[in-house]
Image (cartoon, helix red, strand yellow):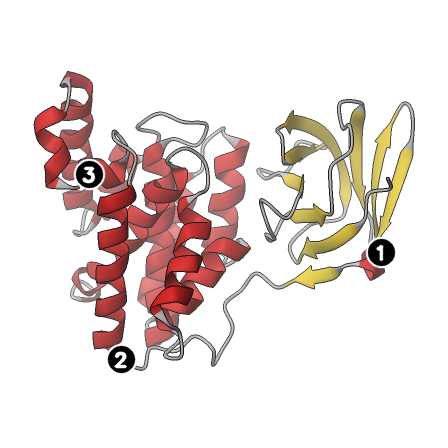
Amino acid sequence: MAMELLSYGDSLPCGQYYKQSTFEQVINFAPTDGGGDYLASIVTATVGDGPLHVMVDHLPDSSQWDWLRVDKNSFVVVSDLEVIVLNKGQGDCYHSQLDWPEVELNSTTMLEQRIKLLTTWLALGSQPGGIASLLHSRWRPAMDSFNRAFYQQLQEGIDYLFSEEWSKGAKMLKGIGPGLTPAGDDFLLGVASASYLMGWAMGREFLSQRGAEIACLVRSNNLVVDSMAGMVAQGRFTYPVKSLLTELLNHKSTPEQLKSAYNLVNNFGQSSGSDFLSGLVLGIERSEQWLSMA
């Protein structure tokens, strides 16, 4: 059955890409010229839309795929056996930035209540050993020596992060923890997203800029992390994250809608989603600390 284009991200640069990695629902491609610290990804609806995603209805046997070419009007997937052309006119363009006035900070009390819900869900459903569980007191008695050291570094990094030495804190948290995307990186991108959201909603450019600076510090030699960090720095988000940020501030949102959006993020990876959510919650809760230093 022929593969069909469903949608594509608004931030995919035209150019030639080589296959970098393959997963069950994702095929990643890196720029052939070596000049970009990002990945273009062909994904299924299970993963969802993103600024650098090409979403298709299914992934056929992709083991032979070698190249992806992004043109003005099409995406071309090339192998030794076939050439697949996906015309952009057949799919929708996903807009990855937040929408106004759908997202508006009408009530800080409403936001506080919703953050409490997220905190409760994280405490009840976090994976042992992930950042969400380490920040919750009930897990501390069971920690081994590795997790105790991880927890101490995490707490020290967080203290610096929300101070005038925020860059020192970000560097302490960067790259720590297990995973294809280290837990510390996921956490920092959650904090950066929170800072961008609060600055954008409150009209405080200082906060949005701080979020962009943190996201830029997360960049390393991990193209998966670098892709996410580069987009967050620009205020561009995957569909799950954008949906959650929208539900947090949309005064018409219900707890059921918020939980649905929360689940989309939390279910990403083994603990990447909950690590990101931990950073998002903390970033919103402590945004006033950064504002006091502006």
Q: From the viewer's perspective, tell me whether residue 23 is left or right of residue 152.
A: right
Looking at the rendered structure, which numbered label has been put on residue 107? 2
SS of the residue at dot 2?
loop
Question: Where 98 sits versus 151, above or below?
Answer: below
Q: Which residue is mark 3?
A: 157
Q: CA distance from mark 1 to mark 3?
A: 45 Å
Q: Which residue is mark 1?
A: 73
Q: Quadrant of the N terminus?
A: top right
Is there CB contact under 8 Å for labels 1 and 2?
Answer: no
Report x, y in % for residue 217: 38, 41
For the residue carrying disc 3, how many other residues have a C-alpha within 10 Å: few (<14), some (14-19), or many (20+)?
Answer: many
Mark 3 vs 2, N-terminal side: 2
Answer yes or no: is residue 282 visible.
no
Q: Amino acid at mark 1?
A: Asn
Report x, y in % for residue 38: 59, 39
Q: Amino acid at mark 2?
A: Ser
SS of the residue at dot 3?
helix
